[in-house]
Image (cartoon, grey):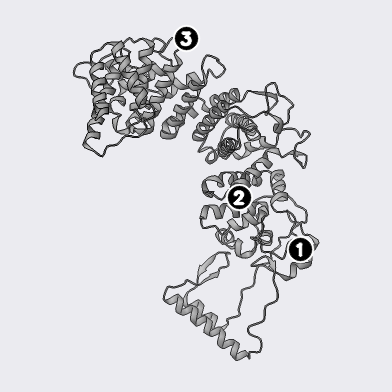
Amino acid sequence: MALKMDLNTIIEQMETGEQDTALTALQTYNKEMNQCFTFSREEEQDREEEKLRQHLGELVLSFLNRELQPSCQLACLETVRILSRDKHCLDPFISRSAMSTLARYAGIAVAGTATPANSKPVEGQVEGEGGEGEQAEEVSSELVKEASPPSENPDQEVIVEALKSICNILLHNETGQVVAADLQLIKGVAERLKQCHDPTWNHEVRFFDLRLTFLLTALRVDIRAQLAQELHGISLLGNQLDATLGLCWPDTLETARAGLEGVPPEELPPLSREQTEVAMEILKILFNITFDTTRRKVDEEEAAEYRHLGAILRHCLMSHADGEERTEEFHSHTVNLLGNLPLPCLDVLLMPKVQQGSIEYMGVNMDAVNMLLEFMEKRLDRGHKLKETLLPSLNLLTESGRIHRETRKFLRSKVLPPLRDVKNRPEVGNALRNKLVRLMTHIDTDVKNCAAEFLFVLCKESVSRFIKYTGYGNAAGLLAARGLLRGGRDSGIYSEDEDSETEEYREAKAHINPITGVVEEDQPNPMEGMTEEQKEYEAMKLVNMFDKLSRTNVIQPMQLGMDGKMREMTPEDLHKLTHNPLFQPEEPADSDNEDEA
């Protein structure tokens, strides 16, 4: 009841219209409610308080449309921020006029869309709807100078509070999202993002500009496309990321930390907390606006932009934040975005020159690829939410290996080194190969398929090599899906490779069970000592058991078709087997071997 009385008292003081009285009341309310993030609606009293909060929101907005002293502006916007946390109390804030007022205080209002500071609804006109001139006027990208805080001395606390309020509204309300799109807020915030080298703006303004941009692009597909195309978002945000990390470019598509040129990546100081926060917001926005890039062709100009961005992302991958947990989160956003880049543009990961301390393979700098592999294995070892945490890095390594010969050979040397252990099953052990083979029978289909695809690419999509490293039993799922159960090679184009057979493998090859992928002890022959009639009787008995289970739909017998894919066995097929149970169709010759390209 005390809060209800407090709200009534605050509302009464607001209704006096006196700035000083309202300021005192709002400051008291803001102090008490600053840490309140949940609002109950269960009791009648709660619903009454909800109505009071909505009324308070209306009064605060009416104040914001007046000429106010800075301290009163700030108090009003702090109250809006607190009230906008309650998704059921947003009605006062989602009209066009209310959103326009908040955009004006945030400094992102756009000419032709903003409602003037002292405007009031015309009689007979619904508040928030455009007037006659507004209907005809074309939206312009020019910022409203007269409605924004003075640029020479902007009150950045006011800007931040307004930005936070808009973010809350967008997060909780679809109507607010539509109004934000209609008011072209993305144009206003993009205009300020262009000032990435301007020291005027503090960290909080920069961060919440980006948080607002992230929400707009996450929630509105049209804004996503507008930022990417009309507002040149890749270049805009790439420059923002460049400035945030403090980069310089000693050579084409090679980055370094300004003032620390020539320092090896592992010796660079960690990024500050503020740098990391801003960089991660940028990476999330770029992920949103590049989500469809791999599904369409990009022209030469776009490819150049993506390569430039890829070089910055390589620097992100090789950088560290303050603390291991924050570093992993930073790298996670980087990997997610790298997965959106057009595949031919991933060559920038290999472009830096080999330096002292670099990992070199075939004359190429493999630092970034090795970092991706370590990141992937770390996620794999953790085993938590593999679909969300592991697949982005695993997919990225798969596609990089498919398109870049040096990357594939390096990954193969790390994941599938020459096979020496022929005593243990491929899924048994702690080597990276063993861990990935275990995933090939994972309960999640996406995880299972992705792990199999990665190993298949490292085997140059050669069936015999794939079976050699994983065992036929583990490989069967991917081979069945590809129609390769009869062997052969898929359609990928791969370079020649050296013979990877070790002496140990060559000696044991004839005794390896292809199903399990290991040498097994000789098992006693269960048919030893049987006459031919007894063998035929047991075979018939087995066929009849299969037939019975099939007819009752307990199982569905399958057989391998000539196209290499599994097909259902009909009763007629089973009947044929009873007459020739040991018949096997002749297999096509498999010309694949370890030396083949």
Front-lying residue, 48 or 589: 48
| Picture coordinates of residue 460, whole percent (x, y) | 67, 53
Marks 3 and 2: CB-CB under 8 Å? no
Question: Mark 1 falls on what kind of element?
Answer: helix
| Picture coordinates of residue 498, whole percent (x, y) | 77, 53
- Circle number at residue 505: 1
Q: Earlier in the sequence, mark 3 or mark 1?
A: 3
Tell me the amino acid under the disc marked 1.
Answer: Tyr
| Location of mark 2 (residue) | 381
Residue 486, image quadrant: bottom right
Callout 1: few (<14), some (14-19), or many (20+) C-alpha neighbours within 10 Å?
some
Q: Can residue 113 be seen in this view?
A: no
Tell me the amino acid under the disc marked 2.
Answer: Asp
Q: Which residue is drawn at 47% across and 77% down?
A: 571
Q: Can residue 103 be seen in this view?
A: yes
Check the image and report above or below for 272 versus 491.
Answer: above
What's the distance in space between the residues labelled 1 and 2, CA to CA? 28 Å
Marks 3 and 1: CB-CB under 8 Å? no
Q: Which residue is drawn at 43% across and 15% down?
A: 142
Q: Given this view, does label 3 or label 1 mark the residue nearer the observer?
A: 3
Tell me the amino acid under the disc marked 3.
Answer: Asn
Name of the residue lying farthest toward the front:
2
| Location of mark 3 (residue) | 153
